[in-house]
Amino acid sequence: MSKVVLITGGSSGIGKSIGEFLTDKGFEVYGTSRSPEKYSNNKFSIVGLDVTKPESIKNAVNHIIEKAGKIDVLINNAGVGITGPIEEIPEAEIKNNFETNFFGPINVIKAVLPQMRKQQSGLIINVTSIAGYMGLPYRGIYSASKGALELLTEAFRMELKPFNIKMTNVAPGDFATNIAAGRYHAPVLDNSPYKETYGKSLELMNEHVDAGKDPLEMAKAILAIINTSNPKVHYKVGEFMQKFSIVLKRILPDTVYEKMLMNHYKL
């Protein structure tokens, strides 16, 4: 029997690339979207699911178990970007980001765990971000939500070891997807003290995404993890310098690293 894979946020970007690649490799793939009716001609099945609504998560997971009989792999990929000066981002937008990027994955994990325990096997892959390893200017909320998921995974995987359920993080760098169009941008306000620096940083962020790597590289990394008997705690996928920035954070004094980031973002 082929392995059954559930990918949240599987209708576009990295999630879609992973889903198509795994389908071609013989996996039975179920992606999710808040509007599944838009994807009737998709290469793999798209199930209705909103990660901010626990009842929607429960219904989608139950539907897949009824149809496929099991869930072997969960890929927590659904997420949203957010940019802006922390002082100026509305509290509702901050909470929404954590609902999607942090609480959503937790609730999807909770929904699949009873089935994986029943199977006495399972793999959960949390898609985080290289931005989650450091507090980036004007991306602080995004860094915080993805960093929280990184730490959660470290704790969760130890709790799940007795049940033969494995968990890991995959932190991508910049990939050429539509994430920039879908994320919340705090507006660049004319009367804002951050107008000049935030405006420049926003342009730089969008350039990085537009020049990002092919999402197929992420799909290949996910397949390699699925085929690994004992996945590592953390994986990083992206440009060398983006991955190397994590190493630099570990070895450089904090103030030196901070200055390096400020120079990069022209602050």
Image (cartoon, grey):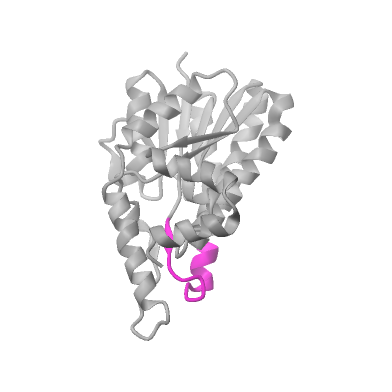
Number of numbered tags placed on the structure image: 0
Is 164 placed above or below 180 here? above
Q: Is residue 129 visible?
A: no
In the picture, measured across the screen, residue 41 lies left or right of residue 96, that is: left
Q: Which residue corresponds to the image point at 29% horizontal and 45% vertical from the top-left?
A: 176
Residue nearest the observer in this picture, 180 or 62: 180
* Quarter the C terminus occupies: bottom left
Q: Residue at x 28, y 35 (%)?
A: 42
Relative to 127, 174 lies left or right? left
- Residue at the bottom extreme of this rendering: 191
Q: Is residue 41 above or below residue 261?
A: above
Is residue 239 rendered to the left or right of residue 167?
left
267 and 18: which one is in front? 267
Location of residue 106 in the rendering, given as x and y in whole percent from the top left corner: 60, 46
Q: Is residue 164 visible?
A: yes
Magenta-tinted stretch: 81-96
The percent coordinates of residue 181 (x first, y second) are 31, 57
Q: Position of residue 109 (x, y in %)?
A: 60, 39
Which residue is depicted at the point 45% across and 22% down?
224
Q: Relative to 176, is 253 on the left or the right?
A: right
Q: Nearer the viewer, residue 229 or 52?
A: 229
Q: Is 50 one of the magenta-colored residues?
A: no
Nearer to us in this view, 133 or 33: 133
Q: Position of residue 111 (x, y in %)?
A: 60, 39
Quadrant position of residue 153: top right
Q: Residue at x 40, y 71 (%)?
A: 186
